């Protein structure tokens, strides 16, 4: 395939607007996959993706298409749709020259339509607007076309109206790709220059790096170097994705495919890295910023004997998801574990679900937190409003786009759900990091008879301290069994107590039942009581069962 017959493109869309369905149709029309009823969401490989109906990990596929007697190679680079994964979208886009922007004909432009459009626009890609689901009864493609013209300045007559489900006009989309998206600008005669835009880990073959060739060619036996790590490798296999790996003799400039070269860890194939031939260095391609974790949570095995199994499962899973950060951590109550950083809450849930489904692990995940920078001085007394309106724009008579500055911890937990239910599902939401802001935050301790419980210390906004402190005290009171003495459960800010619950004294006399009875029975019961105590963690003189922490910390 000469470079001028190659097109590299992505499909971008708001969640559920039909990106995967359109990709399936394109794969069918071009004969990449057989046309059967079982082909739903071919690119969504993971079980969690199929179950949740969302794309988490980008997949790619090469399509072969004959248009007016000319053979074209169309490389479709899949992108995930959810807010949490916009980082994956931007890295997929760096391998493309154009995008198909899918908008639901009924819902119209939504938050991620706007966010994804700007990612493509900033990358200077050709944008083909496609209005999907025109078969729906309430479809209003005209209104959506007007929105697209108003917001993105794209003329109405450039929009393609389709039904990805029924296949209507999907062929037109292929023609537009050929007409509107420029071929990649590169030359096979140049030295090898390959962008790593994704990587996966295969148990038997090691790292499989997805690459886009911006120059030169690559084949088995080539000695290549990573611009990022300076490490040298020998190429074992190259090929294209259809969407499964299919080995080929060579990959040429302009093509998208994969390379296997004896890399043992995904960190060796850094996303955004440039590969070149040994002794033929090139100027590396501008990489992209690495994923920035926004939500942190502790992870512990439910049973400490499972620690090593969980460790190896985590290692394997993070090999496939380099956007998760991981640090060893330990807690007196929950034992040895890790502190993980995720791109967002959905990312965290998906990761957890994959641990359960693909590795059969059951874990304790502590309540998610967001990063703070603390300055230990009274200047934190600065009063900050929790949300500040920044911008407002009417998309049409029925829709308005609002921009707010929010503290991340306010949106991390349940904001998305709350927004959806408040607007009966009509509002949509997207976010980007706006940096650290000063805020009135305090550290709240939980005390048991005056002794702090380190696992339960939290950083919290001062407005919420009373309610949260009260809730934690109440939950603890329910979770801790009564003991021989009274226990004061308190929430405190510095020396100031802001909430208190009292657990009354109680003596659980295990031998009372057999008073005067048989001595061996008595010994047996005492032994059982002692064993039970091993599962307790002592805070001062108070014994707290491990599962009390789990009950208090675990997210509902
Ligand atoms: P993410 O992978 O999460 O980004 O979602 P998506 O954009 O890939 O959406 P998907 O293709 O999974 O489609 C979402 C829902 O819309 C599915 O139930 C599809 O069957 C349905 N759908 C897609 N295209 C059409 C269409 O043309 N008409 C109708 N009626 N439904 C469609």
Image (tube, rainbow, N blue to C red):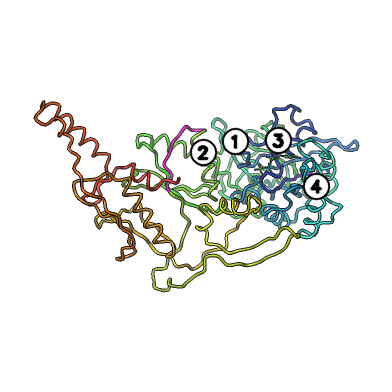
Q: Nearer the viewer, residue 378 or 66?
A: 378
Residue with the mark numbered 4:
183
Residue with the mark numbered 3:
240
Cα distance in 3D space between marks 2 and 1: 11 Å
Q: Residue at x 49, y 68 (%)?
A: 438
Q: Nearer the viewer, mark 3 or mark 1?
A: 1
User: Quick one: label 2 or label 1, which is nearer the N terminus?
Assistant: 1
Q: Which residues are magenta?
A: 358-366
Quadrant assignment for ligand 1: top right
- Is the residue marked by circle 4 packed among few (<14), some (14-19), or many (20+) residues within 10 Å? many
Q: Secondary structure at mark 1?
A: helix
**Residue 290 visible here:** yes
Taking the magenta stretch, the answer to whether it contains residue 38 is: no
Cα distance in 3D space between marks 3 and 1: 27 Å
Task: Say left or right for 461 vs 257.
Answer: left
Callout 2–callout 1 Cβ contact below 8 Å: yes
Relative image position of residue 117 (x, y in whole percent) = 72, 54
Task: Say left or right for 24 vs 483.
Answer: right
Residue with the mark numbered 2:
353
46 relative to 296, above or below: above
Q: Nearer the viewer, mark 2 or mark 1?
A: 1
**Residue 102 visible here:** no
User: Quick one: label 3 or label 4, which is nearer the N terminus?
Assistant: 4
Q: Quadrant of the C terminus?
A: top left
Q: Secondary structure at mark 4?
A: loop
């Amino acid at each position: 395939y000469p470079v001028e017959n190659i097109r590299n493109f992505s499909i971008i869309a708001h969640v559920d607007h039909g990106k995967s369905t359109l990709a399936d149709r394109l794969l069918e029309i071009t004969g990449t996959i057989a046309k059967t009823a079982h082909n739903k969401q071919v690119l969504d490989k993971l079980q969690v993706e199929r179950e949740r109906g969302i794309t988490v990990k980008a997949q790619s596929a090469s399509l072969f298409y004959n248009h007016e007697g000319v053979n074209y190679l169309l490389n479709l680079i899949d992108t995930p749709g959810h807010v949490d994964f916009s980082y994956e979208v931007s890295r997929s886009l760096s391998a493309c020259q154009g995008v198909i922007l899918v908008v639901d004909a009924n819902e119209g432009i939504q938050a991620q339509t706007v966010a994804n459009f700007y990612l493509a626009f900033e990358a200077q890609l050709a944008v083909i607007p496609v209005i999907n689901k025109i078969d729906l009864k309430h479809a209003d493609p005209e209104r959506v076309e007007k929105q697209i013209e108003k917001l993105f300045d794209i003329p109405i007559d450039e929009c393609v109206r389709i039904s990805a489900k029924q296949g209507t006009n999907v062929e037109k989309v292929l023609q537009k790709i050929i007409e509107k998206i420029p071929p990649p600008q590169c030359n096979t005669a140049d030295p090898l220059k390959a962008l790593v835009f994704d990587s996966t880990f295969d148990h038997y073959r090691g790292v499989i790096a997805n690459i886009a060739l911006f120059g030169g060619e690559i084949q088995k036996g080539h000695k290549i170097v990573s611009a990022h790590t300076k490490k040298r490798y020998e190429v074992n296999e190259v090929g294209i994705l259809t969407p499964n790996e299919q080995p080929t003799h060579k990959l040429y400039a302009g093509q998208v495919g994969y390379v296997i070269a004896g890399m043992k860890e995904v960190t060796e194939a850094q996303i955004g890295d440039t590969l070149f031939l040994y002794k033929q260095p090139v100027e590396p391609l501008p990489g992209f910023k690495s994923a920035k974790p926004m939500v942190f949570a502790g992870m512990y095995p439910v049973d400490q004997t499972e620690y090593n199994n969980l460790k190896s499962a985590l290692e394997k899973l993070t090999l496939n998801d380099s956007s998760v950060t991981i640090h060893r951590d330990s807690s007196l109550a929950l034992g040895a574990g890790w502190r993980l950083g995720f791109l967002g809450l959905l990312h965290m849930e998906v990761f957890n679900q994959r641990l359960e489904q693909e590795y059969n692990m059951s874990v304790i995940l502590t309540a998610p937190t967001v990063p703070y920078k603390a300055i230990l001085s009274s200047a934190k007394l600065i009063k900050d409003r929790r949300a500040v309106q920044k911008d407002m724009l009417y998309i049409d008579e029925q829709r308005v786009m609002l921009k707010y500055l929010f503290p991340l911890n306010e949106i991390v937990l349940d904001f998305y759900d709350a927004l959806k239910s408040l607007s009966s599902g009509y509002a949509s939401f997207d976010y980007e990091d706006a940096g650290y802001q000063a805020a009135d935050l305090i550290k709240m301790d939980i005390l048991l008879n005056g002794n702090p419980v380190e696992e339960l210390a939290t950083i919290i906004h001062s407005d919420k301290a009373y309610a949260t402190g009260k809730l934690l005290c109440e939950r603890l009171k329910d979770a801790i069994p009564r003991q021989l003495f009274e226990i004061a459960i308190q929430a405190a800010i510095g020396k100031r107590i802001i909430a208190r619950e009292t657990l009354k004294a109680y003596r659980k006399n295990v031998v009372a039942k057999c008073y005067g009875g048989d001595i061996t029975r008595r010994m047996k019961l005492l032994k059982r009581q002692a064993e039970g105590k091993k599962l307790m963690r002592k805070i001062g003189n108070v014994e707290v069962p491990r599962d009390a922490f789990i009950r208090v910390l675990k997210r509902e």
